[in-house]
Amino acid sequence: MLLKNIARIFRENLAILGWRIALIGIVSILLSQTLIILLPKIFQQIIATIDSHGPYQTLAYWCGIATIVSLVAIAAQLVRYRVGDYSWGVVYARRTVDYKQLLTRKNYATLLNYGTGKLISRMSKGIDAEGDIMYHLVFSFAENIFRIGSICIILIYYSAWLALGMLSLLVVVALLQVLIAKKLAPVAEACETTHEDEKRHMARIVMENLLIRVSNREHSEVARGQEIVRDYPRLNFLYAMYSWSLFHLLELGFRGIEIAMFFWFGWQSIQWGVPIATIVMLSTYIWLAWGPIEHILSQVRTIGKEYESYVRMREVLDTPDIYADGAETYHHTRGDIELRNVSFGYTETITILQELSLRFEGGKTIALVGHSGSGKSTIMKLLLRIYDPRNGSILYDGQDLRDLRIETVYRHIGYLPQEPAIFDGTIRENLAYATTEREFSDHELWQALADARLDERVKQFETGLNTEIGERGVKLSGGERQRLAIARIFLKNPDIILLDEPTSALDSISEKIIGDLLVDLSHGKTVIIIAHRLQTVMHADTICVMDHGKVIERGTHAKLLAANGTYAKLVDLQSGTLRE
């Protein structure tokens, strides 16, 4: 799995970079490292010239060559590092966009299970990790391995035993690295879990800050935060101790090789006159080899954690794609919707709907009412394909929802939940979110606001349509946020409208305004509305009363009142005036 994922990162990110950038990076690496490896040989000539009291011209010649080689090597390294930085930026920007797009296509219910903070943590750390792994693979690893390999070839020429000692040390360290990596894997996983839990807790504190304050829960939340990170210092210490202990072992081995080299060639110099310049050159090569090996160990240590972040991100991205199942295009005709023998439960042991068959006639307004837990919201989630039924099928104009490309269905749907989705931006931006198929003129935007009885309120803002309304539309009241969402539906003008308790959190006056707007909005459209407050649905063409996942009553408001059943009791519980 490790090699498969590494190959995937390498392949996909090289495709993003293109062969030109990769080629420039590889050429700059080969050029800079080749010149760096030549420098000890040039220094050997300089020292030999000095040691033999050679002519000034020879010394000047080799010093000039060393200067030119150094300058070109530095220039090549500048290119290599700038190409690497640019490549990381390209991959990060492209992956950020790609993965956001992928998230919009994932099963919504699956994403909800992660929680906001945890999901953001996984995605942000995973994208960073993928960029870092790509950078290390394409640039740092290639650079370091080329230098180490070249130096080993040179050392073989002067002393096979010296080269063999270095290679043996590298093999031992590589084997130890594999063993330590296996031991560190659960530690890295535990560290990542701590990071995700901490981000999720931070999101909880930010999003529910007011509730925490008024409930006097600051101390308990702080205690919970402390519990989350309680083991993190120990885990981080263990990870560092195991990984850096290998680094220090390798450093000790290299120092031993260097001392052995000085002793062997020093003895040969004393006995047979081996040039001091050669000893200095070999020492320089050992020093040059130590740097890349140090970098590789550091990179392996870093990648160990980053790979865990990448794997966790891929776990999210590799969840089923709700667009992947269907291949057919939804062709809207009447807007008939049918649940046919549908069974569903959120867990294997709990069943919410059992072989439910229910038909919503196109062009009509159908209301679902009943006590909490009766299955109303579950039906709405199935209609939006947040979930798929265990058994049975959901049909849009006779077409099975699972066979359809879901975006072609959403194109015909307007959805208004209890808490409307209002973005941190301007009124104009929130209205324009109605559809991607065209842009709206200011006249159309103002008309939609007028239809939603919100135009006069927006005109009170100094910047009108360009007014920033804050996160979740905090500058608007609850009723105004709901009307802004309705204005968005007016702009989209969908054939099917799904309303999930659109007035439950509103006062009576706002409820009356929203109720009138929904009547205006529903003409000639298929409207399915869920409501606890029955005043919202009394004008529906059909009211379905649900209980324990079944429809127990069905009819108009008047017929259900006359039947004096469950619906009539619900009406009496809320207000006897609804009987009028």
Image (cartoon, helix red, strand yellow):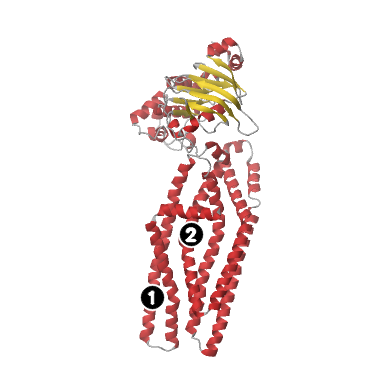
User: Which numbered disc, 2 or 1, marks the residue closer to the eye?
Assistant: 2
Mark count = 2
Instruction: Classify 165 as above or below 374.
Output: below
**Residue type at numbered disc 1:** Thr
- For the residue labelled by badge 2, is the local secondary structure a helix, a strand or a loop? helix
User: Which of 282 and 429 lies nearest the eye of the viewer?
Assistant: 282
x 52%, y 40%: residue: 320
Q: Is residue 293 left or right of residue 525?
A: right
**Residue type at numbered disc 2:** Leu
x 44%, y 33%: residue: 328
Give the percent coordinates (x, y) of residue 3: 53, 56
Q: Which residue is mark 1?
A: 67
Instruction: Classify 99 as above or below 362.
Output: below
Image quadrant in which you'd find residue 301: bottom right
x 54%, y 83%: residue: 265
First reached walking from the N terminus: tag 2 or tag 1: 1
For the residues bearing labels 2 and 1, Cβ distance under 8 angstroms: no
- For the residue labelled by badge 1, is the local secondary structure a helix, a strand or a loop? helix
Give the percent coordinates (x, y) of residue 165: 57, 74
Instruction: Classify 261 as above or below 103.
Output: below
Can residue 416 be seen in the rendering of this structure? yes
Q: How crowded is the residue under tag 2: few (<14 C-alpha within 10 Å), some, or many (20+)?
A: some
Q: Which residue is mark 2?
A: 137
Please tell me the numbered disc located at residue 297: none
Distance from disc 2 to disc 1, alpha carbons, whole Å, reads 31 Å
Give the percent coordinates (x, y) of residue 516: 46, 19
Q: How crowded is the residue under tag 1: few (<14 C-alpha within 10 Å), some, or many (20+)?
A: few
Give the percent coordinates (x, y) of residue 260: 58, 79
User: Which of 373 and 464 lies nearest the eye of the viewer?
Assistant: 373
Can residue 247 be seen in the rendering of this structure? no
